[in-house]
Amino acid sequence: MRNWSLLVVKREFSATSCGARRMAESAKLLVDDVLQGYPVRQWVLSLPIPLRLLLARYPKELSKVMQTIHRAISTDIIHRACYLKKQAKTEAVTFIQRFGSALYLNIHFHMLFLEGVITQTQGQTKFKRVEAPSHSVMERIVNTISHRIAQYLEKAGLIQRDIENTSLDLPIDD
């Protein structure tokens, strides 16, 4: 079993031919070495505008936020497959996109997760598929991700939580 549980591919664009070549090389890597014919589901996670601004200013924190999102989704998939994290793994590839089509700041993640888990017993690798998450499962995952990101950013000293207000309020001069 390959250890591709968290592969991050940054999308960077330069000359058209170089960008096309890089996209083709990335696609070949994904198809041949990472996905290996397993079914995948795309998750697109966008961030609230104040959080986009904060993470644009502190890019090192962006990877911590992405890891938090990855862990929450992975744990959910593993638990829905009726396994513990030490018994099974799921794999993902994440593309971090920083801008929208009009080059406005729009930090978001395109994540390709396996639609199930991989287990290894007595040297044999097995794949167990899980159903698509229901609406209630998606709400639970989003709440988990939101709380974990808020906890991390508060611990890192980048935000202060206001118990009475659930919105992210950043000072205008920041």
Image (cartoon, grey):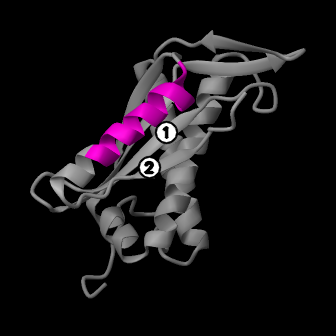
Density class for disc 2 (Cα within 10 Å; few <14, some 14-19, many ≥20) is few
Q: Residue at x 43, y 75 (%)?
A: 58
Residue nearest the observer in this picture, 119 or 138? 119
In the image, residue 76 above or below residue 144: above
Where residue 92 sits in the image (x, y, percent)? 53, 35
In the image, residue 74 above or below residue 69: above
Q: Secondary structure at mark 1?
A: strand
In the image, residue 73 above or below residue 56: above
Q: In the rendered image, which residue does mark 1 sit on?
A: 93
Name which of mark 1 and mark 2 comes first in the sequence: 2
Residue nearest the observer in this picture, 134 or 9? 9
Density class for disc 1 (Cα within 10 Å; few <14, some 14-19, many ≥20) is many
Residue 109 lies left or right of residue 4; in this view the side is left
Q: Residue at x 31, y 42 (%)?
A: 23
Numbered mark located on residue 9 in the image: 2
CA–CA distance in space, label 1 to label 2: 7 Å
Where residue 136 sits in the image (x, y, percent)? 45, 23
Pointers 1 and 2 in contact (CB under 8 A)?
Answer: yes
Amino acid type, mark 2 = Val
In the image, residue 150 above or below residue 32: below
Residue 133 can be seen, yes or no: no
Name the image quarter holding residue 128.
top right
Q: Which residues are magenta?
A: 21-36
| Quadrant position of the C terminus in the picture | bottom left
Q: How many marks?
A: 2
Q: Residue at x 65, y 21 (%)?
A: 117
28 magenta-colored: yes
| Quadrant position of the N terminus in the picture | top right
Residue 10 lies left or right of residue 72; in this view the side is left
Amino acid type, mark 1 = Val
Numbered mark located on residue 28 in the image: none
